[in-house]
């Protein structure tokens, strides 16, 4: 790949697709190779696609509010209503994190939990 990056007339060309610097908008130089903006865009698309596939494979099951409350039952005595409210809030927080929602999209209610 790093072999011929210059044409006979001194024009640089992309080491990946072989297009000359006159055929592309931008040609970026590396230590021994050149890459054009079109190849960079193609690489970005490939990486983004693989990342999305990997992300969809890694979807894990969220703990249900009842499961979260069961864990809280091991550490907190009484306070059943507070544990239920907290378990639902934690579950919704996990869902919001996994879906990638912005924090500004959520309207929070203030309460005196402590």
Image (cartoon, grey):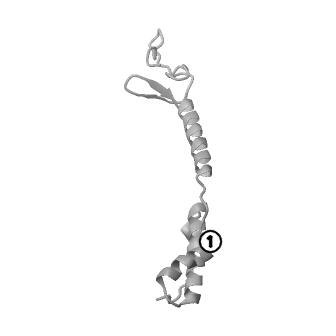
Q: Position of residue 55 (x, y in %)?
A: 58, 50
Where residue 62 sits, quadrant-wise, is: bottom right
Question: Residue at 57% of width from left, 79% of height from top?
Answer: 69
Q: Residues within 10 Å of mark 1 (few under 14, many from 20)?
A: some
Question: Where is 49 relative to 5, above or below?
Answer: below
Q: Quarter of the image holding residue 83?
A: bottom right
Which residue occupies the extreme left position in the image?
Answer: 31
Residue 101 in sight in this render: yes
Q: Nearer the viewer, residue 109 or 13?
A: 109
Residue 6 location, x and y as percent? 45, 15
Does 48 sit left or right of 1 as displayed? right
Side of 33 relative to 72 (left or right): left
Depth order, front residue of 66/27: 66
Question: Looking at the picture, does residue 76 appear above or below residue 20?
Answer: below
Is residue 3 positioned above or below 91 on the image?
above
Q: Which residue is mark 1?
A: 64
In the rendered image of this protein, does residue 78 appear above or below residue 60?
below
- Work out whether residue 100 can be spotted: no
- The image shows residue 75 at horizontal and vertical percentages of 47, 82
């Amino acid at each position: 790949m790093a072999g011929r990056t210059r044409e006979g007339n001194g024009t640089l060309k992309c080491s990946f697709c072989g297009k000359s610097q006159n055929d592309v908008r931008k040609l970026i130089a590396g230590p021994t190779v050149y890459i054009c903006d079109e190849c960079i865009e193609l690489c970005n698309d490939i990486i983004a696609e693989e990342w999305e596939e990997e992300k969809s494979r890694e979807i894990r099951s969220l703990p249900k509010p009842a499961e979260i409350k069961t864990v809280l039952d091991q550490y907190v005595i009484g306070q059943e209503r507070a544990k239920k409210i907290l378990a639902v809030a934690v579950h919704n927080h996990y869902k919001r994190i996994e879906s990638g929602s912005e924090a500004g999209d959520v309207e929070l209610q203030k309460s005196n939990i402590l």
